[in-house]
Image (cartoon, helix red, strand yellow):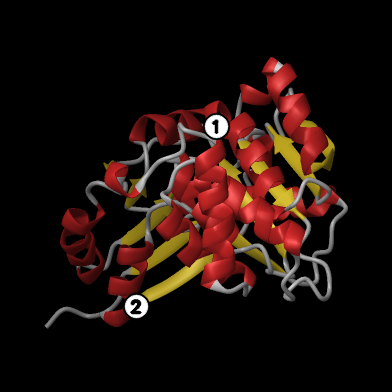
Amino acid sequence: MATMTGRLQVIATPIGNLADLSERARAALAAADVIAAEDTRHTAALLQANGLSKPLVSLHEHNESRRVDALLARLAAGEQVALVSDAGTPLLSDPGYELVRAAAAAGFAVSTIPGPSAITAALAVAGLPTDRFCFEGFLPARASERRSALAALVHEPRTLVWFEAPHRIAATLADMAAVLGSAREAVVARELTKAHETIYRGTLRELAARAAADSNFARGEITLVVRGAPPGAAGVDTQLLRRTVEALSKELPPGRVAALASQITGATRGEAYKLASRRTAVDPESPTEDEMP
């Protein structure tokens, strides 16, 4: 019977500045028998920069399920397995969940070597409340799905944190201003810890306008931090209903707009449908029920 002597170590790596790799993380990578990496080429460069050379196996969103059994077998043989992502702490919008869960369920020791994370780094410099926050990963790429996801968070009082792709940042900020409210405070943290680190601060309206005019917004890694809903925002108000209907009507027919807007704002479905129908009548390009995918 195999003894549970193997150990899985979840290791945080730099989000940009290579000097942020801790001595403990470097020692763990040096001692590992194998390193499960999101991108082996990226991790190979990190190892080389630190004078290390180790066996690497890829573990990403498309192959993690297939890799788990082989890595568990290595743990059962007593090996030290290190798990890293391309940047920051694994499992936070990165692969590793299935492996960690399976290793723990099988009785292997799972430990962490903490370190950099774009989430905490952005919160640290944002100047927005950090006593309570929620991380929402990446928003959907499709505009209609993105607006629906934002609409579901209109009343969320905690500070909100997202990652966003640079080519979508302008559209995302515009949608946030429309759905969450243009006066909400927000921060765009770009290229954290890197040479071109930039922190943009302002309201969602201001940031959306700047993103549309400044090409630098569409460069590098981006973390978004947005202030949560103000106290009392859970009540229904006409402006919120109009904003919600306007945002959803760009992609959805009146019936679906009414259902979602009613759920999000607390307004009656009839009131939401009246606004959506009125908008469809004014804008002939608005989708109809026949145009639903």
Foreground residue, 223 or 160?
Answer: 160
Secondary structure of the residue carrying numbered label 1: helix
Per the image, the residue denoted by label 1 is 168
Q: Residue at x 21, y 58 (%)?
A: 65
Amino acid type of the residue tagged 2 in the rendering: Ala
Secondary structure of the residue carrying numbered label 2: helix
**Does 1 sit left or right of 173 as displayed?**
left
Q: Quadrant of residue 166?
A: top right
Foreground residue, 37 or 35?
Answer: 37
Amino acid type of the residue tagged 1 in the rendering: Arg
The quadrant of the image that shows the N terminus is bottom left
In the image, which disc is placed on residue 214? none
Question: Percent position (x, y) of residue 13?
Answer: 56, 46
In this rendering, is residue 76 above or below 251? Answer: below
Residue 80 appears in the figure: yes
Q: How many marks?
A: 2
In this rendering, is residue 213 above or below 29? Answer: above
Question: Percent position (x, y) of residue 106?
Answer: 25, 80
**Does 56 sit left or right of 256 as displayed?**
left
In the image, which disc is placed on residue 104? 2
In this rendering, is residue 199 above or below 6? Answer: above
Question: Percent position (x, y) of residue 217?
Answer: 68, 25
Q: Residue at x 33, y 49 (%)?
A: 289
